[in-house]
Image (spheres, rainbow, N blue to C red):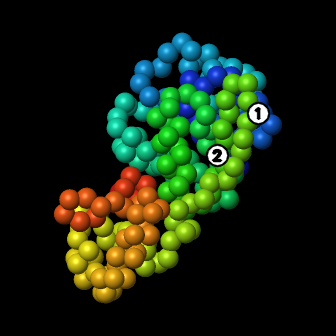
Amino acid sequence: MKIHFLAIGFTPGVFKPIASIGADKIIGFHIGPEDKKNKEVINFLEKNLGIKVVKKRLEPQELEKLAKEVKKIVEKETNPGDEVYFHIGGGQRELGLALTLVSLALDYPVNLVLSRPGVKPVITKSVPVRTLLTEKQIKALKEINKTITLTELAEKLKIAKPGVHRMLSTLARYGLVEKVEGGWKRSLVGELICGS
């Protein structure tokens, strides 16, 4: 099944890549109250593609909560083997950013579609960050559920401090953890990967 996720509020230019790719299902995100322009765009897509757009209205909130909510919806609406597309070039910018972050945190790659008015759409595969991690790194990431010191993490993992330091440095390079006062904590993408 080909499923497209996008921010409602995009220009009808997004119609072309969806039409050329094909779609079985479209999930449209919108933050705040629905307005006339959103209804026009949805009607345009439904009329021209012959596919009902499932609307998911989200409350205005900080990016971390928004990305977690979007991830839950994506996981609920997709099944293994689905061909998934995230349209990240239009609509409300925070939704494009949330979709981009979610693409990194999923266990499978998705197609990122960047479509802008007047520019040929670009489609690329995401690389799930989890696929770059070893089992030890995933375990370490899960153990960092609150601010933790290097010593505490070494004790939990039963690994020498130099090994844990190298692991934290790698996780920090991937943008999954960050050094904070009092130790280390997971970043937003780290939280999304761990499902928190």
Q: Identify the secondary structure beneath mark 1.
A: strand
Residue 124 place in picture, x, y as percent = 69, 49
* Closest to the observer, 69 or 140: 140
Q: What residue type is labelled 1?
A: Lys
Q: Which one is earlier in the sequence, the residue at label 2 or at label 1?
A: 2
> In the picture provided, is 80 more to the left or to the right than 72?
right
Q: Name the residue under label 2.
A: 112
Question: In the image, what residue occupies the spot 50% across and 15% down?
Answer: 35
Looking at the rendered structure, which numbered label has been put on residue 95?
Answer: none
Residue 144 visible at all? yes
Residue 32 place in picture, x, y as percent = 41, 24
* Closest to the observer, 57 or 126: 126
> In the picture provided, is 67 more to the left or to the right than 54?
left
Q: What residue type is labelled 2?
A: Leu
Residue 55 visible at all? no
Looking at the rendered structure, which numbered label has been put on residue 120?
Answer: 1
* Closest to the observer, 106 or 88: 88
